[in-house]
Image (tube, rainbow, N blue to C red):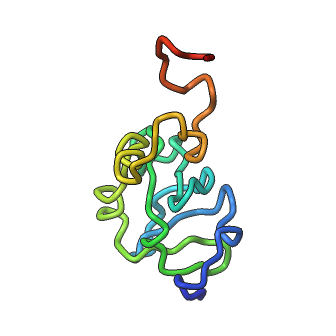
C-alpha cells in the first residue's frame, strides 16, 4: 500500500479501477485533473456523469487499484461536478482545460475567439 501523502500524480494511471474502503468498485479513472481524479462517466457508480474526487480521498494504491478512504456509497455523495470543482478551486472558466475540458466544451460568450 502506498502512503497517500507520498502518492505522486504519475502513480495514478488512466483506466485504473477505483474502490471504496468497503472494497466495492465505484468507478474507473478517466484521468487526473489538477488535484482531482476525474472518473469515467460510463461507470454505474457515477450516474452517467463525469464526477471528480479530491486526491485527498485516496488512501493508497494497491495492485493497480486506487483505494479510497470511504465506502462506495459515501464516495457517491462526495463526488463533485466540474462546476463545483471550478467554484471550489476559484479557477476562471477558461482554465477548464486543467480539468480535461475540451476547447469545444468551453463556455460561449461574445468575446469568444478574441
Q: Residue at x 37, y 50 (%)?
A: 80
Q: Residue at x 64, y 62 (%)?
A: 16
User: Residue 4, percent across and down?
Assistant: 53, 82
In the displayed structure, 6 sits above or below 92; it is: below
User: Residue 27, percent across and down?
Assistant: 50, 56
Q: How many marks?
A: 0
Q: Quadrant of residue 48?
A: top left
Q: Is residue 66 left or right of residue 47?
A: right
Instruction: Identify which residue, 62 or 3, lies in the foreground.
Output: 3
Query: Can you name the residue that lies furthest to the front here?
Result: 114
In the displayed structure, 22 sits above or below 36; it is: below
Q: Quadrant of residue 71?
A: bottom left
- Classify the position of the N terminus by image quarter: bottom right
Q: Quadrant of residue 11?
A: bottom right
In the displayed structure, 85 sits above or below 92; it is: below
Instruction: Identify which residue, 49 or 31, lies in the foreground.
Output: 31
Instruction: Identify which residue, 60 or 17, lies in the foreground.
Output: 60
In the displayed structure, 63 sits above or below 110; it is: below
User: Residue 79, percent across and down?
Assistant: 37, 54
Q: Residue at x 58, y 36 (%)?
A: 101
- Classify the position of the C terminus by image quarter: top right
Instruction: Identify which residue, 25 or 36, lies in the foreground.
Output: 36
User: Residue 40, percent across and down?
Assistant: 55, 46
Q: Residue at x 35, y 46 (%)?
A: 87
Amino acid at each position: 500500500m502506498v502512503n497517500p501523502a507520498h502518492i505522486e500524480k504519475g502513480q495514478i494511471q488512466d483506466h485504473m479501477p477505483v474502490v471504496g474502503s468497503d472494497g466495492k468498485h465505484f468507478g474507473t479513472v478517466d484521468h487526473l485533473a489538477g488535484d482531482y481524479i476525474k472518473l469515467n462517466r460510463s461507470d454505474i457508480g457515477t450516474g452517467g456523469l463525469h464526477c471528480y474526487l479530491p486526491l485527498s480521498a485516496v488512501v493508497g494504491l494497491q495492485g493497480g487499484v486506487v483505494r479510497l478512504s470511504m465506502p462506495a456509497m459515501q464516495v457517491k455523495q462526495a463526488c463533485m461536478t466540474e462546476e463545483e470543482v471550478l467554484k471550489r478551486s476559484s479557477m476562471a472558466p477558461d482554465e477548464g482545460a486543467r480539468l480535461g475540458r475540451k476547447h469545444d466544451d468551453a463556455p460561449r460568450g461574445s468575446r469568444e475567439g478574441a
